[in-house]
Image (cartoon, rainbow, N blue to C red):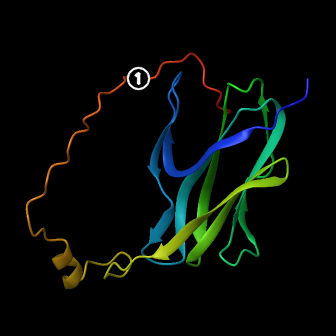
Amino acid sequence: MPTKQPSLQFSVMCLDLIEEERKPPTFQYLFYELPFPHLPFRMDRFHVINCWSNGEGQYKQEVKILDPARKEVFIKTGEQNFNLEDPFTPQLMINVFADLEFKEQGHYWVQTFLNDKMVLEYPLTVRLVETGQKPGGPPSPKEKEKGKPTSPPVPPKKPSAPSIGPITTDEWNIPN
């Protein structure tokens, strides 16, 4: 039987995730940019999660993040093998990038490859945030003034759509 090339259903970046037995992972703190108070800045970790579906057979993926000049690989996963037994069972590929030091601001480029062919590329913006203080120092008077509320906070509105309840399933196809 010929293999069917899978589709990349999604690729997301998040700072953390919660994995519970017999449940899908919960992605926490999805992001598209990293605002830092200073550079260089060392991050504990973040995740790039790819979901492959609608295919059959053996494949390999690789995730690379290029520097803003697009000349050097900032970090990469290396090749990761996975198997899709049928087109209706997706495969989550959870990649953890740990202990990274960002030295410059700009647009880093997240690239996802399937069998050595790039299938997706998107920017990860690293930028400096004006905090009005030195790292580890007290806030400046200007920063203190910014933090004062000018009117009472408005409570968030509750969603009008009813909840559908928890998703139940016996198995999630997530590699360890």
Q: Residue at x 68, y 25 (%)?
A: 88
Tell me where residue 110 sits by quadrant.
bottom right
Left or right: residue 121 versus residue 60 is left
Q: Residue furthest right?
A: 1
Q: Is residue 128 above or below residue 16?
A: below
Left or right: residue 93 versus residue 131 is right
Q: Position of residue 123 (x, y in %)?
A: 60, 65
Q: Is residue 124 above or below residue 48?
A: below
Q: Position of residue 70 (x, y in %)?
A: 72, 74
Tell me where residue 91 sits by quadrant.
top right
Front one among 4 and 49: 4
Tell me where residue 176 sits by quadrant.
top right
Front one among 7 and 95: 7
Q: Position of residue 148 (x, y in %)?
A: 14, 71
* Tag 1 secondary structure: loop
Q: Residue at x 49, y 66 (%)?
A: 34
- Would you call the spot at circle 1 few (<14 residues within 10 Å), some (14-19), or many (20 or more)? few
The kind of residue tagged 1 is: Pro
Q: Position of residue 138 (x, y in %)?
A: 26, 77
Query: Quadrant of the image for the N terminus?
Result: top right
Q: Residue at x 16, y 78 (%)?
A: 145
Residue underneath mark 1? 166
* Number of residue marks: 1
Left or right: residue 115 versus residue 161 is right
Q: Residue furthest top?
A: 170
Left or right: residue 38 versus residue 95 is left
Q: Residue at x 24, y 35 (%)?
A: 160
